[in-house]
Image (cartoon, grey):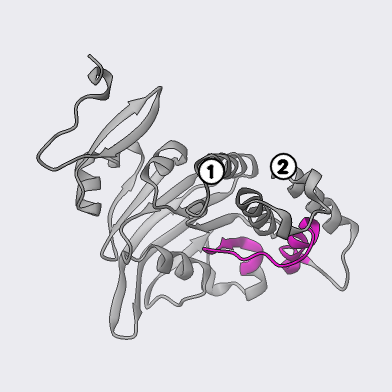
Amino acid sequence: MISIRQLDFAYGSRPVLHGIDFEVASGELVSVLGMNGSGKSTLLRCINGLLQPSQGKVEINGRTTDSLSRQELARTIGYLPQNSQPVDCTVFEAVLIGRKPHLGWQVNDTDLAEISRILSLTGLSDYTDRSTLQLSGGELQRVAIARTLAQQPSVLLLDEPVNHLDIRSQIDVMDLIRTLTLQLGIATIAVMHDLNMALRFSDRFVLMKEGKLLAAGGQEVMTAETIREVYQLHVVRHELNGIPLVTPCPEREPMRDPTTANT
């Protein structure tokens, strides 16, 4: 369980976050949504301890993050920023880098077993000796996720994890994130821009506007009215084969019901 309580943050005299308050349970994937500049990435950095909130606190399993050492924090929170760049190494070496918070003087059998397990979980067992420079975008993102999981975190923070990927890779990576969140019992918080990807894979949602929490909850908060307030955009909310979707449409020309579009 991770709890964010009344979090405020400012860059100098410019307030960015105001009273952010929500929690995420183990096994839950929560998407943070909002327009550019609403404070989403800043929120992740405050949770991770890269930025110091001016007020409020972050608690993980009852302990505040400011009471944890940097090593304890690295073992507790895995953070994948935007645009993680590959280095010229093998996939195994790239994932091993994420093991750093647990390493002693040398890599031991426990470390090797954990890396092998993570490679298997992320579908990378056959890529162990391949150079990261030879991988596709989707494969690289799997490696980045595997490297983060090598820390054995209980909280996973992802900043726009699929925005740079093609549609097939987006679905594959989001499905992987969802599966790993459940399988490993991680509390996952992902900043997302694609509303339909968020709707399809997330358990709950945090909607932000101008640094404030506008709404938090499950599918019930993702109404056309709330989305319009957040994004200043008129949308229609519907489903296709049980998959929730939102479609932008002109303000004065309401979109026809997709189930009757061809009649």
| Viewer can see residue 61 | no
Determine the residue positioned at 50% across, 42% down.
Answer: 167
Q: Between 34 and 63, which is closer to the camera in this rendering?
A: 34
With respect to residue 48, does 139 lie above or below?
above
Residue bearing mark 1: 174
**Image label count:** 2
| In magenta segment, residue 97 | yes
With respect to residue 126, does 114 lie above or below?
below
Determine the residue positioned at 25% across, 17% down.
Answer: 262
Residue 102 placement (x, y as % from top left): 76, 65
Q: Provide the residue span drawn in magenta.
A: 73-102
| Viewer can see residue 54 | yes
Count neighbours of disc 2 (C-alpha within 10 A) and say few if under 14, some if 14 to 19, many if 20 or more: some
Q: Residue furthest top?
A: 263
Q: Amino acid at mark 1?
A: Met
| In magenta segment, residue 262 | no
Residue 94 placement (x, y as % from top left): 74, 62
Residue bearing mark 2: 123
Q: Secondary structure at mark 2?
A: loop
Q: Secondary structure at mark 1?
A: helix
| Residue 173 picture quarter | top right
Q: Between 230 and 183, which is closer to the camera in this rendering?
A: 230
